[in-house]
Image (cartoon, rainbow, N blue to C red):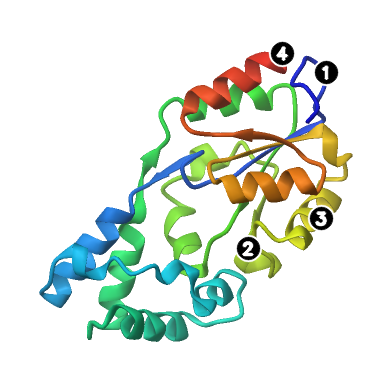
Amino acid sequence: MPALAPGAADALLFDLGRVVIDIDFGKVLACWAGHAGCTPAELSKPFSQSETFRRHETGHASDAEFFEALRTTLGIGITDEQLLEGWNTIFAGEMPGINALLARAARRLPLYAFSNTNPPHVAHFSKPYADVLSHFREIFLSCAIGLRKPDAAAYDHVIRAIGAPAKRIVFFDDLVENIDGARKQGLTVVHVTSPNDVADALTALGL
């Protein structure tokens, strides 16, 4: 992987969840469990690996299809409205200090974001997080582009849209599989485990 050094980047690309916006899936399960009259532990099946979940994140399954699949997977009989309510409790505020870090970086380089997400979440987070999201020249959303991380085609789409050599785009993500996929497509990568990783990378880039 190319070293992070002053002048090594033409653009920065950030994941959103747990990099820019904190997420707390426990809040989702707690809300659903409250409606269903059970405990959150009873709802901890890994539905995020389902084909319907992936199709929802690439714009190929409707909200209604996704919620019906959720009911089946989780074995609960709550309404679409109750599922949506819980689904949107996932957002837990900005990651500490990230707004200032993005503002600092944006003075020197163009910033972009790339998120695996779905239409209900986009509708829910766009307004309350408009300030921190304003630092990005463009936000690539899986449900809008029809491609999701860690698929190679997703990174290739974003690299072409940014218009810089892949090795000169620094990509920040919290998930190992997304980092590995990005590295395979030539991006320079930073595995984010806390905002300190973003701060350290920016410092190494001279930003």
Helix or strand or loop: what does disc 2 sit on? helix
Badge 3 amino acid: Asp
- For marks 4 and 1 on the same chain, the one whose residue lies earlier in the sequence: 1
Q: Secondary structure at mark 1?
A: loop
Q: Are there few (<14), some (14-19), or many (20+) residues within 10 Å of tag 3? A: some
Q: Is residue 32 above or below residue 167?
A: below
Residue 142 is marked as: 2
The answer to whether 134 appears left or right of 24 in the picture is right
Q: Is residue 207 visible?
A: no
Residue occupying image coordinates x 45% and y 67%? 48
Identify the image quadrant of the C terminus: top right
Categorize mark 4 by other alpha carbons within 10 Å: few (<14), some (14-19), many (20+): some
**Which of 119/189 is in front?**
189
- In the picture, measured across the screen, residue 183 lies left or right of residue 88, that is right
Vertical placement of 82 versus 103: above or below?
A: below
- Looking at marks 3 and 2 on the same chain, the residue that comes earlier in the sequence is marked by 2
**x%, y% of residue 62?**
51, 82
Identify the secondary structure beneath mark 3.
Answer: helix
Residue 41 at x, y percent in the picture: 20, 63
Q: What amino acid does circle 4 point to?
A: Gly
Q: Earlier in the sequence, mark 3 or mark 1?
A: 1
Left or right of 22 in this view: 193: right
Which residue position holds label 3?
A: 156
The CA span between labels 4 and 1 is 7 Å
Q: Residue at position x 36%, y 41% from top?
A: 93
Which label sits on residue 206? 4
Q: Label 1, on which residue?
A: 7
Q: Is residue 112 visible?
A: yes
